[in-house]
Amino acid sequence: MSFHHSVLYQDVLDLLEPRAGGRYVDGTLGDGGHALGVLERSAPDGELLGIDRDPAALGRAQARLATFAERCAFHCSRASQLSQALSARGWPAVDGVVLDFGLSTPQLDDAGRGFSLMHDGPLDMRFDQRQEVSAHDLVNHADEEELVHIIRRYGEDNQARRIARAIIAARPVGSTIQLASVVDQAVGGRRGRRTHPATRTFQALRIAVNEELDEVRDAIDAALEAVGPGGRVVAISFHSLEDRIVKRAFAAAVGVGAERDGYGHPVVPPRFRKLTRRALKGEDRDAHPRARSARLRAVQRLPLPALAADNSSALSPSPAEAPRRS
């Protein structure tokens, strides 16, 4: 079994700083690439809990991490259900959480999953194939207004109305290649585009099917609650909608926009500090084909004494901050 290279692998490990005896969570386990690095760096007794909503991905990761079986456990659920997974494990808090949102390469490469417009397959797009609603259901049964809403909001495509009408006119639409062709014809082909004209539609449908934006929001909140003093949360997003949610959640955690007293001090001291002043870009930092759109952000929970002693540290850069930022 071959495994793909994890996006921003080195940056994730440098920011997370796994150590011996620590407890860590990979909330979007995928093939287990980041988890493997965490377990190696936290030797000999660091522990890891791997979570993924895709049973197939969980199975691949278990095979990859088999040599660390005594130090890792697995939980099939959404990352947003982190607190339940920790309770089942008996961990009150952890030293770090990694969240790598979006698709993995094996999911894209598996035509039967229906994620890619480059491979002919069924219109599925479910991370967890046990859930009821698939992309096929939305494409063939949603009304025009719902399709317009999905494509415009989640795909950020200004031709959403034209695409929605073309999809409805072409029903029944049964495969990924058929859907890609319908969208291509609706918007007039590539004509100098860097990406296929159906890319945004596929992204929008996938996000809608898996409720991804709600999941990102809830997973970040759960991760921030899960780490103890000194604990770190590292998150990778792959499009602006995800990154905006991560950016705002981390900004709130470090006290940006918080109510201040007459001296300019936060009324409620921040609980975290930024480890990345701005998002780290995957482009030019990583050979992974998906790295071009990757954005990495990280925060660290302040030690308890520092909450009252030094609020200004919430906005201080970390020595772990990578040199190239955007």
Image (spheres, rainbow, N blue to C red):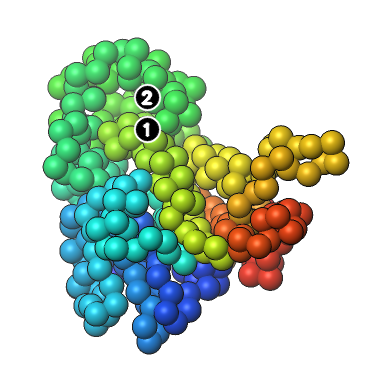
Residue at (38, 18) in percent of width and height = 148
Residue 255 shown left or right of residue 244 in the figure: right
Viewer-nearest residue: 156 or 81:
81
Q: Is residue 297 above or below residue 40?
A: above
Residue at (40, 84) in percent of width and height = 43
Query: In the rendering, which numbered label is found on residue 280?
Result: none
Viewer-nearest residue: 36 or 238:
36
Q: Is residue 188 above or below residue 243?
A: above
Residue at label 1?
Answer: 204
Q: Are marks 1 and 2 in contact (CB under 8 Å)?
A: yes
Q: Position of residue 169 (x, y in %)?
A: 24, 14
> Of the residues shown, which amino acid type is indicated by label 2?
Ile
> The residue tagged with tag 1: helix, strand or loop?
helix
Q: Position of residue 131 (x, y in %)?
A: 17, 38
Residue at label 2?
Answer: 150
Which sits earlier in the primary sequence, circle 1 or circle 2? Answer: 2
Q: Position of residue 266 (x, y in %)?
A: 73, 42
Does residue 268 appear in the picture of this structure? yes
